[in-house]
Image (cartoon, rainbow, N blue to C red):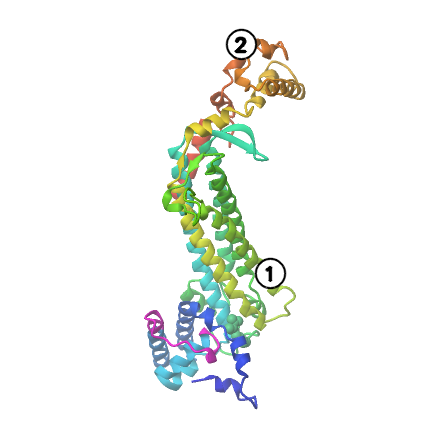
Amino acid sequence: MNLEFLRCRFKKDTDKVVANYTASIAFDHRLYREDVAGSIAHARMLAKQGIISEKEAELIIMGLVSIREEIEQGEFQFKLELEDIHMNIEARLLEKIGEVAGKLHTARSRNDQVALDLRLFCKEAIAETIDGLRGLQGAILEVAEANKDVVMPGYTHLQRAQPVLFAHHLLAYFEMLERDVHRFKDCLDRTCVLPLGSGALAGVPYPTDRAFLAQEIGFDQISQNSIDAVSDRDFVIEYQAAASITMMHLSRMGEELVIWSSEEFRFIDIDDAYATGSSIMPQKKNPDVAELGRGKTGRVYGNLLGILTTMKALPLSYNRDLQEDKEGLFDTVDTLLPTLEVFTGMLKTVRVNTERTYQAAAGGYSLATDLADYLVKRGVPFRQAHAIVGKLVSYAIDGNKDLGQLDIREYQQFSDLFAKDVLDITVEASVAARNVIGGTAPGQVQAQLDRARSVIEGI
Ligand code: ARG
């Protein structure tokens, strides 16, 4: 079969350039499983409703199953002249089972067909994305648990701010990814809606059973407006938006891994298996995986912008512009899933240089806030305490000393409320003091770890 039947109202063949320009088979062949699944469900429904006979449905389904096999064996010949995956499969069905193949497209249009295929694709992509996110969360938890007592500087403005537990810092990413999981679960709800039965746009004049179709497909909702069902791709946009947010999170993590593994920081060592060398500088060990995760975020944002722009101002209902919904989506899935996978492996094998992180946490006047809090506990208003400690820090900087290197007399030059016990303000004491829900005190971080563990184990 070729597309001759489509050309009956024309007096000329399609121009070659046009055929090349409009064909989508180069990328939508990827939807073959979804397309076959949709067609099988449709054939069953047509038979159940008496629109085609049981015998015809059986033939059609058998043909579709064997086509799926041919594709999986790499034996299927995709033809550009047949435009897209839908026509390629239908044409092959005709070759295999004869004229009865022509009955499959009863009460259906490519418009509701492709909408279904893409929804099925997104459903699967969401499941795999959530698995990937859970895997990375598991790695975060593993590294956090293994380094439970490790202290590091917490930063604001990338300047040392206050000491925190390394596990606390890592678990921040666990929380981000947890919200990502929920975003994907949430968009699953709006993805699993059956468009089939909408026809080209107006519905179909056959006694179809859409509830049966939804059940066969495994969707729990049915689209309530046929024009909307063939027109909108907001479920694709939602996937792309959620993916963009996840990539943004991964990019921040990648950035930190790059910084932490630098000679200047030396907080972590990235495993050799997750680093690459330089073609000129023999000593180099580069964190390319983390960098690429950061870099690939750009293309995922680009794909989101692409589909948003394609959809903008499209009149209802179906327009061929919508064919542009696929490549960006595929690219996003093909970027996000491997990024999650490779970050999981990279993180699991990271070694933390605990002495370095401790030294860094103790230096840089990170305990200044604790000194101010010390005065507050002795009745000084916080703003005044802030000023006193500010002067003390300035004095220490001038003397080229850390706070811990000052003696008690030097402290007392700034406030006579400073007593000997001010010297007990250590990194450990600072961390332990932040004993609020979500804080960095060991007990609180343990609670975060426990919570994370129960999330991972699905309790
Ligand atoms: N390849 C098309 C797409 O991806 C399938 C639907 C074609 N429908 C049409 N009316 N030309 O959107």
Locate the C terminus and report the quarter of the image it occupies: top left
Residue type at mark 1?
A: Leu
Q: For mark 2, does the 10 Å Cα neighbourhood hold few (<14), some (14 to 19), or many (20 or more) residues?
A: few
Q: Nearer the viewer, residue 68 or 424?
A: 424
Q: Nearer the viewer, residue 100 or 248?
A: 248
Residue 131 drawn at (x, y percent): 41, 51
Residue 223 visible in rendering: no
Asked whether, in this view, residue 13 is left or right of residue 41, the answer is right
Residue 30 drawn at (x, y percent): 43, 67
Please name the residue shown 38% across and 38% down the image.
142
Q: Nearer the viewer, residue 106 or 146?
A: 146
Locate the N terminus and report the quarter of the image it occupies: bottom left
Q: Which mark is residue 308?
A: 1
Q: For mark 1, does the 10 Å Cα neighbourhood hold few (<14), some (14 to 19), or many (20 or more) residues?
A: some
State yes or no: discs 1 and 2 in contact (Cβ < 8 Å). Answer: no
Please name the residue shown 57% across and 91% down the image.
11
Residue 340 drawn at (x, y percent): 43, 50
Residue 156 drawn at (x, y percent): 58, 34
Query: Is residue 3 depicted above or below 170 in this figure?
Result: below
Q: Which residues are magenta?
A: 68-85
Q: Which mark is residue 420?
A: 2
Q: Quadrant of residue 124?
A: bottom left
Residue type at mark 2?
A: Lys
SS class of the residue under badge 2? Answer: helix
Closer to viewer: mark 1 or mark 2: 2
Q: Nearer the viewer, residue 206 or 315?
A: 315
SS class of the residue under badge 1? Answer: helix
